[in-house]
């Protein structure tokens, strides 16, 4: 097993009783313990906003994230929890953003986690333009699991060229979503189109908050430094309100390309 810096999850349905994630405080506790044992220091909790079946209001997310922080401290679980959301893209996303209904990751107003409808590549140029004006960077959740992108992978590169960062689900890299999704995830990684790996965890048993196996897989496919960027450092920037963009990642990669590679432990 290779050593790693602490993992940081920017996509996790950890908060209890708000969406299809943790269904109780006991499940939240179990998820948090699993995450800490796996090597996580920080989780940005991302309940769904604007899907057909659930929209969690900002105030609910803020209150529940603060309650979760206190609860985990009382239980001696050393996991930092920040508030965020996974925003489903649709016809009303732009108006909801402009009305202040949507939560950025860590509430830093720097990154917005967005999710495409699973069956389609929804055009969201208007929203991209508004976000760009306000220097807010969209992060696309699990592009490798979107059927339209799977059928036309070139859209991923188009979106990255427009400044959209890409987040893979950890389980996609280890085969949890089938061979086609795994192959697409590996291709995106090989093409340099991946910026984060996150768990998208929904519970302690089904889709648990585990990163270690995906980290190992990225080490095999792309090296320790890339695995550390995708599983640890880029997420740390987002959780702490740092600036991370397609351009900053590209510049950083160019610099690191000249550095000697760290030996795996
Ligand atoms: Fe999710």
Image (cartoon, helix red, strand yellow):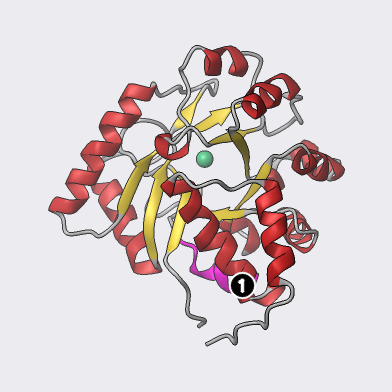
Depth check: give the residue in front, 184 or 166: 166
Q: Main secondary structure of the magenta part?
A: helix
Q: From the viewer's perspective, is 247 left or right of 20?
A: right
Residue displayed at 25% across by 42% down? 68
Res. 12 in view: yes
**Quarter assignment of residue 118:** top right
Answer above or below: position of 238 versus 138.
below
Answer yes or no: disc 1 within 8 Å of ligand 1: no
Q: Tag 1's secondary structure?
A: helix
**x then y, percent, for residue 157:** 81, 45
Q: From the viewer's perspective, is 22 left or right of 121?
A: left
In the image, residue 211 lies in the stretch drawn in magenta: yes
Answer above or below: position of 85 versus 240.
above
Residue displayed at 18% across by 46% down? 71
Residue displayed at 52% across by 36% down? 110
Depth check: give the residue in front, 250 or 78: 250
Q: Which residues are magenta?
A: 210-218
Answer above or below: position of 95 versus 50.
above
Answer above or below: position of 131 versus 145.
above
Residue displayed at 74% across by 72% down? 257
**x then y, percent, for residue 218:** 64, 69
Which residue is label 1 attached to?
Answer: 225
């Amino acid at each position: 097993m290779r050593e790693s810096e602490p993992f940081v999850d920017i996509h996790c349905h950890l908060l209890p009783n708000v969406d299809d994630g943790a269904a109780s405080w006991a499940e939240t506790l179990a998820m948090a313990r699993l995450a800490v044992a796996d090597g996580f220091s920080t989780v940005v909790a991302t309940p769904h906003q604007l899907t057909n079946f659930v929209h969690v209001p900002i105030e609910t997310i803020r209150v529940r994230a603060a309650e979760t922080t206190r609860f985990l401290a009382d239980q001696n679980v050393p996991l930092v929890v920040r508030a965020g959301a996974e925003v489903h893209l649709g016809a009303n996303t732009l108006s909801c953003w402009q009305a202040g209904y949507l939560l950025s990751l860590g509430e830093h107003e720097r990154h917005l986690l967005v999710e495409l409808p699973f069956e389609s590549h929804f055009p969201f140029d208007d929203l991209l333009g508004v976000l760009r004006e306000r220097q807010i960077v969209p992060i696309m959740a699990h592009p490798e699991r979107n059927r339209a992108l799977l059928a036309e992978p070139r859209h991923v590169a188009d979106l990255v060229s427009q400044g959209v960062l890409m987040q893979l689900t950890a389980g996609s890299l280890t085969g949890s979503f089938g061979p086609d999704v795994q192959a697409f995830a590996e291709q995106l990684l090989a093409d340099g189109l991946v910026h984060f790996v996150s768990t998208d965890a929904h519970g302690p048993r089904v889709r648990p908050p585990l990163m270690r196996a995906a980290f190992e897989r990225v080490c095999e496919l792309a090296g320790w430094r890339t695995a550390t960027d995708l599983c640890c450092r880029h997420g740390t920037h987002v959780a702490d309100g740092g600036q991370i963009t397609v351009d900053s990642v590209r510049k950083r990669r160019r610099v690191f390309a000249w550095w000697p590679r760290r030996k795996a432990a």
